[in-house]
Amino acid sequence: MQYPKAIKAGTKIEQIAGAIDLLPTLADLAGIKHQSSKPLDGISLKPLLLKNTQNWPNRLLFSHWGGRISVRSQQHRLDHTGKLYDMVADPSQTINVAAQNLTLSSQLQKEIDAWKKEVLIGISEDKRTFPVGHIAYKYTQLPARDAQPQGGIKRSNKYPNATFMTHWTSINDAIVWEIEVLEEGDFEVELYYTCPANDVGSTFQLSFNQQTLTAQITEAHDPPLRGMEHDRFPRMESYIKDFKPLKIGTIHLEKGIGKLMLKATDIAGKQVMDFRLLMLERVR
């Protein structure tokens, strides 16, 4: 962080902090009163940065990912398996000290349980659909990341971000989005695909409730995967490639909730295409 007029170069701060502190800290440094209908989770680090505080509250920072929760105090971290680490003496987290600190481990576990009840209630019951066609916005993106593959279709990687759909080899396969059309209208549809020359010619259909739109792959586009040339270490996420846009026509979407579905009606070669994205443009 650089703020030459206020923060001395080389300043080091030992107190723990998290990304939740960025907004209140930057707003405070800029002299902006943050307005929100809900309280912020973070706190301003301005007093630490400007070295004008003698007292700082003891904090607990919680991390949650894939149902796993850990909690960090200034000195310790309790992970999702109940292992306790002294982060000051053992920042690499190699020695589990839970057995020597049973009371502390129990206290931190109670803090995790309380945090779960306050923050995660109902998270597994989230059935929200993807909004489409907001009247104030001309475009709606529906990437492969947010779709559900059915049949033999697979994601290019188990981690959804930046993925595309591949192995589309059957007319029984489908790519599906659970959507809610917010305002009825006509939408021009652009699809991003790749397809080897030997597989050109497949026809496919986009449908929503009773409305359908049929199109065909007529031009080959088969670029290589890229990204690995920039990696120092092989990434876990999907590599990418350059997908070609194809305007497939206009579909009328009625207001309401339903399944937006891509299915093949005829497969000319071994596969239909690799699919990356639908772009919907409101035209009426």
Image (spheres, rainbow, N blue to C red):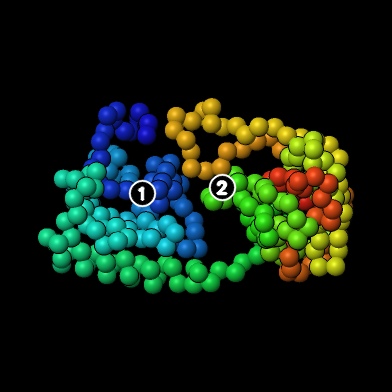
- Pinpoint residue 86: horizontal percent, then vertical percent: 19, 51
Q: Which residue is mark 1?
A: 18
Location of residue 79 in the rendering, given as x and y in whole percent from the top left corner: 29, 57
Considering the image in quadrants, where does the N terminus appear? top left
Q: What's under tag 2, amino acid-wise? A: Asn
Residue 228 place in picture, x, y as percent: 53, 31
Specify the quadrant of the image occupied by residue 260.
Answer: bottom right
In this view of the protein, which residue sits in the foreground, 99 or 115? 99
Helix, strand or loop at disc 1?
Answer: loop
Tag 2 residue? 157
- On the image, which quarter does residue 195 sit in? top right
The amino acid on which the numbered mark 1 sits, given as a three-letter code, is: Gly
| Horizontal relation, residue 198 to residue 164: left or right | right
Residue 64 pos. (x, y %): 40, 58
Residue projecting furthest to the left:
100
How would you rate the neighbour count of disc 1 (Cα within 10 Å): few for under 14, some for 14-19, many for 20 or more? few
